[in-house]
Image (tube, rainbow, N blue to C red):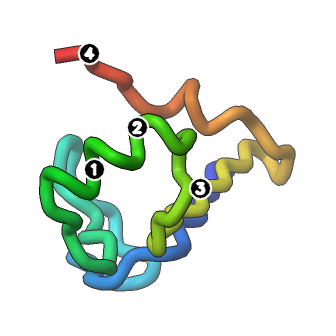
Amino acid sequence: ADLLIVLAGLDVLYGEIGQVLPEGFPVGLMGGQTPDGDLIASRDSEGAGQGRSETLYIEVREHNTPVDPLTWFTADKD
């Protein structure tokens, strides 16, 4: 295949390495604890991402050339 997608930082995986998942199928779940509502509200004034323990690394390569991952994922505002 001429496409490689690397995802690192998932705690739970729903597939096996090399497995092709159906369109719209979840790949896995992030780890970490879910903060309570008060903690989330206080973080809004501190800046984006500060204090977060989980990070998802996404790398996309087409024909062994890095490409912007945003072109591969839908960002719905709903």
**In what element is the residue under mark 2?**
helix
Upstream in sequence: badge 1 or badge 4:
1
Q: CA distance from mark 3 to mark 4?
A: 20 Å
Nearer to me, 77 or 43: 43
Q: CA distance from mark 2 to mark 4?
A: 18 Å
* Quarter-of-image position of residue 5: bottom right
Question: Is label 2 in contact with label 4 (beta carbons under 8 Å)?
Answer: no
Query: According to the image, label 2 marks what residue?
Result: 44
The amino acid sitting under disc 2 is Asp
Q: Residue at x 47, y 65 (%)?
A: 52
Q: Residue furthest top?
A: 77
Give neighbour class at mark 2: few <14, some 14-19, many 20+ (Cα, 10 Å): few
**In what element is the residue under mark 4?**
loop
The amino acid sitting under disc 3 is Ile
Give neighbour class at mark 3: few <14, some 14-19, many 20+ (Cα, 10 Å): few
Query: According to the image, label 3 marks what residue?
Result: 58
Question: Is label 1 in contact with label 4 (beta carbons under 8 Å)?
Answer: no
Question: Is label 2 in contact with label 1 (beta carbons under 8 Å)?
Answer: yes
Q: Residue at x 26, y 70 (%)?
A: 28
Q: Position of residue 16 (x, y in %)?
A: 33, 84
Nearer to me, 39 or 1: 39
